[in-house]
Image (cartoon, rainbow, N blue to C red):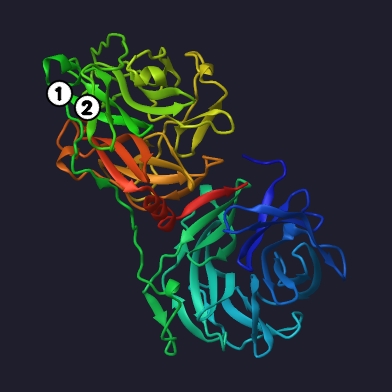
Amino acid sequence: MRNKNILRGLGSALIDDKAYIFICSDNEIGHGGFVVRESEDGIVFETKTSNAKIVSINGPSDHFDKYDFFHVSKDDKMYYLTYKLYDKKQLCIARSKNLIDWEKRSSLELNVSNAKIVSDYLYAGRNVMYGGGDALRLYVSEDFENWKRSKKDLITVACDDNELLVMEAQIVQDGVFVMYAEVEKDKGVLQYKLYGALFDYGDPTKLLWQSKEPIYETKNTRNNIATLFGVVIFDEYFVSYWNNEDDEMFLVRHFYNHSSDIEESDEMLDIVDERLNDEISNEISFELKRSKSNPILEPRTRHDSTWESQATYNPTAIENDGVIHIIYRADGDDMMSVWGYASTLDGVTIKDRLTNCIYQRKTPSIKMPFAPPALYTSGNNRGGGCEDPRAVLIDGTIYVTFTAFDGWNSVRVGLTSIDFEDFKNKRWKWKKTVLISPPGEINKNWVLFPEKIDGKFAIMHSFTPNILIDYFDSLDELDGHTFINSNNTRPIDPSRKWDSWFRGVGPAPLKTNDGWLVFYHAMDHNKPDRYRLGALLLDLNDPTQELYRSQGPILEPEEQYENEGHKWGVIYSCGAVIKDGQVFVYYGGADKFVCVATAPLQQLLDSLKQNTDFRMLIN
């Protein structure tokens, strides 16, 4: 979406362990003004000032529609800003005492694409600056105005048409670490490859280590061109900042892919910074632990249980006062889907299981004289009914979204509810179901958030290509005549691996201190033979923003009860709860059994944060 007051990122900096980004709005672009935002982690920013300005002692202020690549450095007295004029071989330097009021000191006729002065560092009593272009070069100065270039090029680009950009240069334990980008330009498409290099602290021209493979690289398409405007580096991760052609800024957080495949100089230090030298971490993924009691629910063939004789699967769950209530989908001899009930105190051992179903819905008779134009299969259900419940408890009421199957051409999302006191006392006084997705569309996997967001009910109804959430003051607004318009295309994302084909959100999100924990089902589109389960975290305040995602599946069908049933190679979860520091994920195995897998919640969250990159819009 285009904003009337468009913001463009100019650059970034890490100063005294705080990240800064510098932004120019189109309202200020001709006045030399810009915005300074500050962050503890490089991700969540607060505005430090919206009226920073550079004043030139020799003329008018600069127009920032012609400048970019702000790099800020400091010494014990001042901050120093370098920035580059687009169409001239001119590097500008300004100084400030407060990051807000800047005085332009000089314009240098240097053949550089951009440059970064190293903070709090002197070499032989002189300040040091690394500059980019067709090579990485070093410059030194005694007064920040007169700079001399070292005789040799430090690093050259792989191809004459490529450009080298200095993204960061900072002091680390073993020397001066420089992160740079090599930019490949091909018919207007930019591809960035980020590399790292370590130089000797005592001689910043002396290369000790250089990454042979990119630390990170993009594969932009013409429909998604993005330009890199900054990088900040923290101990365990770095954050890159981007502008795109849709007038949006976004950031990407990357944990280090430490590589031992490096080019060594003859005089390389014996000990290189550990974060640059570890073995590569390829798709390390946390895995849920299956219960040894699986499956915890199986079909029953007793004469009074014909409603669940064929399959019991795809359960949802809620926890209250130490009791986990399970609502599971069941298929019977009539091949209709209904819901059954069971409960557990420890999350695994079934304490109570009813002999009668607790919810069913009448469906119109289904006549299929010809092959259906919109083929839909789900488990052993051929007679319609209510599938795949997803329950939440909000303000004393249980709300359930589910798939309402009324025939091949009516696969819609239903919504019903029940008072929790009635539910606990097994009085099945369900509110009449309303269909909340439009007719004529196939929609599934819609979930309610388990608490209101900004005082409103929130329904997440699409996850890819964008997260779509609708908010309601009351769910009575969805009266069977008002529908949620969604996007159910679920396109393939070839940039992903195991989860390139997203199939749907699993249980309702779980609230944690680190974000909304969401489990989801996906496949590898090149091998669409198995449903796998992944995990991610969404921002608590704006759940359309993805924070972290598992690099690999956290559960995939490997056991007999996940492969030998009505559908081979399927794990499908509709319910998860947090109890005593553990997360219990309830899922269907092979469209026939109810199973559970667990993990310590904090370990799962830590794994998500440590082994994944994420992309987030900068608002």
Query: As drawn, which residue projects farthest toward the front?
Result: 321
Return the x and y of residue 367 as percentages of the image width and height: 26, 10
Q: Is residue 358 left or right of residue 191?
A: left
* Marks 1 & 2, CB-CB < 8 Å contact: yes
Return the x and y of residue 170 as percentages of the image width and height: 58, 74
Three-letter amino acid code of the residue under disc 1: Arg
Three-letter amino acid code of the residue under disc 2: Thr
Q: Which residue is mark 2?
A: 312
Element on which disc 2 rests: strand
Return the x and y of residue 234 as percentages of the image width and height: 53, 65
Q: Which residue is mark 1?
A: 300
Element on which disc 1 rests: loop
Relative height, residue 19 to residue 577 (above, below): below
Nearer-N-terminus badge (1/2): 1
Q: Is residue 134 visible?
A: no
Query: Residue 228 sits in which quadrant?
Result: bottom right
In this orientation, which residue lies closer to the viewer: 286 or 217?
286
